[in-house]
Image (tube, rainbow, N blue to C red):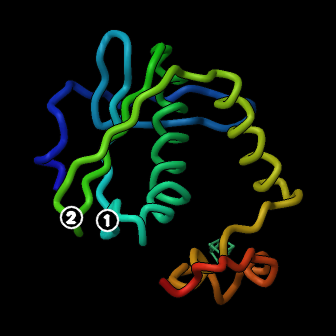
Amino acid sequence: MKKLAERHPSIFYAKEWDRYVVAGVPTGIREDFVYEFKSTVFSNSAKYKWRIDNSVLPVARTQANIYAGLFKRQRWVVEIFSCADLKLHGWEGEADYGDVERTLKEFKTAEEGGEILPPMCWKCESCKYRDHCKVKDKCKPSRRQGI
Ligand code: SF4
């Protein structure tokens, strides 16, 4: 699937943040943007678009934004290939370094045993940690759950 991604050079980079090391390898990196490629089984049709908009895209965008912060790039570009409709969908935006900091702080809060925002219930259905997870009981039901 990666063959469908745009060709850009990439690099591994790790940086200390608080008491952690944030490491990453973006799909690609250029002088002014980072590029992240994902694939999904969902189509971008009216029926399934919400899955891309509410799960695949936010995760990819957050990851790309963290890379933008890590590599000090001004923009991020995300492409998601839909295996269902065989189309490549693209998004891009300005890097938000403040959001990188917020995301890392949310991770730290969760890792230190603080309050964890429960995900949508459908995410827990196939999670390999569900047998040991105490958060799953607070998951948020979706009116579209089961699609
Ligand atoms: S089962 Fe727990 S770890 Fe897995 S997605 Fe749900 S809340 Fe997250």
Q: Please give the label number shown on residue 67.
A: none
Q: Is residue 134 above or below residue 4?
A: below
Front one among 79 and 105 = 79
Front one among 110 and 47 = 47
How many C-alpha atoms fall within 10 Å of the one at disc 1: few (<14), some, or many (≥20)?
Answer: many
The percent coordinates of residue 51 (x first, y second) are: 48, 65
Q: Secondary structure at mark 1?
A: loop
Q: Is residue 94 left or right of residue 88?
A: right
Q: Is residue 108 left or right of residue 7?
A: right
The residue lying at 56 percent from left, 36 percent from top is 22
Identify the mark nearer the N-term, 2 or 1: 1
Identity, as a three-letter code, of the amino acid under mark 1: Ser
The residue lying at 88 percent from left, 59 percent from top is 115
The answer to whether marks 2 and 1 mark residues whose Cβ atoms lie closer than 8 Å is yes
Identity, as a three-letter code, of the amino acid under mark 2: Asp
Q: Is residue 16 above or below residue 79?
A: above
Q: Which residue is mark 2?
A: 85
The residue lying at 55 percent from left, 41 percent from top is 62
Q: Is residue 79 left or right of residue 131?
A: left
Give the quadrant of ligand 1.
bottom right
**Residue reaching furthest front?**
46
Q: Is residue 87 above or below residue 140?
A: above
**Residue reaching furthest left?**
3
User: Where, by quadrant of the figure, is residue 111 drawn?
Assistant: bottom right
**Residue reaching furthest right?**
114
The percent coordinates of residue 59 (x first, y second) are: 52, 50
- Ligand 1 within 8 Å of the CB at mark 2: no
Q: Which residue is mark 1?
A: 43
Count of numbered tags: 2
The percent coordinates of residue 80 (x first, y second) are: 31, 49
